[in-house]
Image (tube, helix red, strand yellow):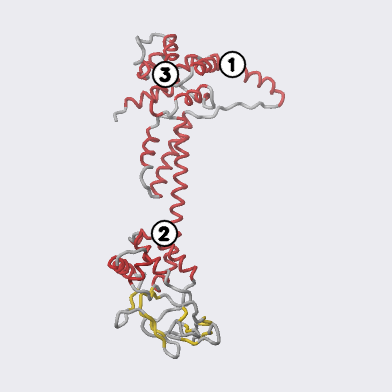
């Protein structure tokens, strides 16, 4: 049986849910405080034990986040939010407000739209209609605590709390996994484009990333990029190995030998450049700006010095690169960069990186020209 406590001894009860003051007016702010609700309710439309308010809104947020799974639109969610706002803690899960009042709280939608939304929730099993004989919404109680509630019952929604919370958690996990995989893919793309700016796979993957992908599709792209990165690393970015001395007594001789080998490599850098005909044939963009055919390396170097300022590469930067890696290798860099064209965002920064920066040791004109020749011969 329900036990009620009057807020003041001198107040007497009026109709259900109202309190009458000394002057006879009903005060909406004065209501009975329910001390216990441990009665057994039977009959049509009886409300089950009330769900805590915090849990109610947690369930609402779960349905809001998973609405796409049930084919719900934002308008449905707004209607449900307004209906939940009519529930009071400890007063059951039935909405007794009229359609007009619900429409007003939603923000002024028409009653026909409200009825469509209610029908949709009933169809999905999130709501139940308990209609009275005169279609009014109210609650009646017997003397022994039994009650019948006529209205829109949200009990089915609250009973499916675990289902909705689990679905919301799965969607959140999937969202986080997609973000994580996408970041991994972007990282692999950056490494791949740094080593091979003209790589066709990277352009295809970036086009694919414009679409909304599933986790399986993201993983497939990541696996493909990792395999490509391994091949590129083996071909271009293979680390230079060094034979370690057998004992401490060989340290000085090993150091001297390493310095001599380094000097030999620097002096032979011009000899590592590709054949002149290969450079002028593959890099037709650069040769198209020449007034006559380039017959020797001197003409190639002079032409590269002419092209550098046109590409946004300062003359002093080119001369510094020519002293560091050799004039032939610096000229090859100019020709290759111009051939790559839009694949490189900043000509000046890229030129500095492969001739004077951290990528200088990995810059191999012959290998890049070979790849460019294969790319140009593949029909698109």
Residue beneath the point at 44% across and 41% down: 185
The spot of residue 175 in percent (x, y) is 44, 52
Residue beneath the point at 45% across and 20% down: 333
Q: Nearer the viewer, mark 3 or mark 1?
A: 3
Residue at far bottom of view: 143
Residue beneath the point at 33% across and 75% down: 129
- The image shows residue 237, relative to residue 269, as above or below, that is below
The spot of residue 226 in percent (x, y) is 45, 39
Labelled pair 3, 1 in contact (Cβ < 8 Å): no
Labelled pair 1, 2 in contact (Cβ < 8 Å): no
The residue carrying mark 2 is 65
Instruction: Tell me the element at label 1.
Output: helix
- Quadrant containing the C terminus is top left
Q: Nearer the viewer, mark 2 or mark 3?
A: 3
In the figure, is residue 317 to the left or right of 79? right
| Corner quadrant of residue 95 | bottom left
Give the Cα distance between marks 1 and 2.
65 Å
- Pointer 2: residues within 10 angstroms few (<14), some, or many (20+)? some
The residue carrying mark 1 is 263
Disc 2 or 3, which lies upstream in sequence? 2
Q: Nearer the viewer, residue 270 or 82?
A: 82
The spot of residue 319 in percent (x, y) is 51, 15
Disc 3 or 1, which lies upstream in sequence? 1
- The image shows residue 267, relative to residue 47, as above or below, that is above
Instruction: Tell me the element at label 2.
Output: helix
The residue carrying mark 3 is 310
Q: Nearer the viewer, residue 118 or 137?
A: 137
The spot of residue 233 in percent (x, y) is 48, 32
- Pointer 3: residues within 10 angstroms few (<14), some, or many (20+)? few
């Amino acid at each position: 049986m329900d036990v009620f406590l009057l807020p003041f001894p001198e107040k007497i009860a009026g109709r259900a849910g109202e309190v009458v003051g000394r002057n006879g007016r009903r005060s909406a702010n004065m209501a009975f405080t329910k001390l216990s609700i441990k009665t057994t309710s039977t009959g049509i439309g009886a409300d089950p034990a009330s769900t805590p308010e915090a849990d109610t809104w947690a369930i609402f947020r779960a349905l809001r986040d998973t609405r796409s799974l049930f084919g719900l639109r934002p308008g449905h969610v707004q209607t449900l939010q307004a209906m939940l706002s009519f529930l009071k803690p400890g007063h059951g899960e039935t909405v007794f407000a009229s359609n007009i009042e619900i429409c007003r709280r939603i923000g002024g939608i028409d009653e026909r739209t409200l009825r469509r939304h209610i029908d949709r929730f009933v169809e999905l099993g999130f709501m139940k209609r308990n209609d009275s004989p005169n279609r009014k919404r109210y609650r009646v109680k017997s003397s022994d605590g039994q009650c019948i509630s006529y209205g829109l019952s949200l009990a089915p929604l609250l009973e499916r709390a675990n289902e909705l919370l689990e679905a919301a958690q799965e969607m959140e996990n999937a969202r986080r996994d997609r973000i994580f995989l996408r970041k991994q893919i972007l990282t692999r793309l950056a490494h791949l484009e740094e080593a091979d700016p003209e790589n066709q796979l990277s352009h295809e993957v970036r086009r694919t990333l414009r679409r909304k992908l599933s986790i399986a599709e993201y993983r497939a792209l990541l696996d493909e990029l990792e395999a490509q990165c391994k091949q590129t690393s083996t071909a271009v970015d293979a680390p230079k190995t060094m034979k370690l001395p057998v004992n401490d007594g060989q340290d000085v001789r090993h150091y001297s030998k390493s310095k001599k080998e380094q000097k030999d490599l620097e002096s032979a850098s011009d000899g590592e450049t590709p054949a002149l005909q290969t450079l002028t044939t593959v890099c037709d963009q650069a040769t198209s700006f020449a007034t006559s055919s380039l017959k020797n390396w001197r003409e190639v170097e002079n032409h590269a010095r002419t092209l550098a300022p046109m590409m946004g590469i300062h003359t002093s930067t080119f001369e510094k690169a020519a002293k560091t890696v050799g004039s032939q290798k610096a000229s090859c860099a100019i020709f290759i960069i111009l051939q790559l064209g839009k694949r490189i965002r900043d000509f000046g920064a890229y030129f500095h990186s492969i001739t004077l920066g951290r990528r200088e040791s990995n810059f191999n004109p012959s290998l890049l020209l070979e790849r460019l020749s294969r790319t140009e011969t593949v029909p698109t």
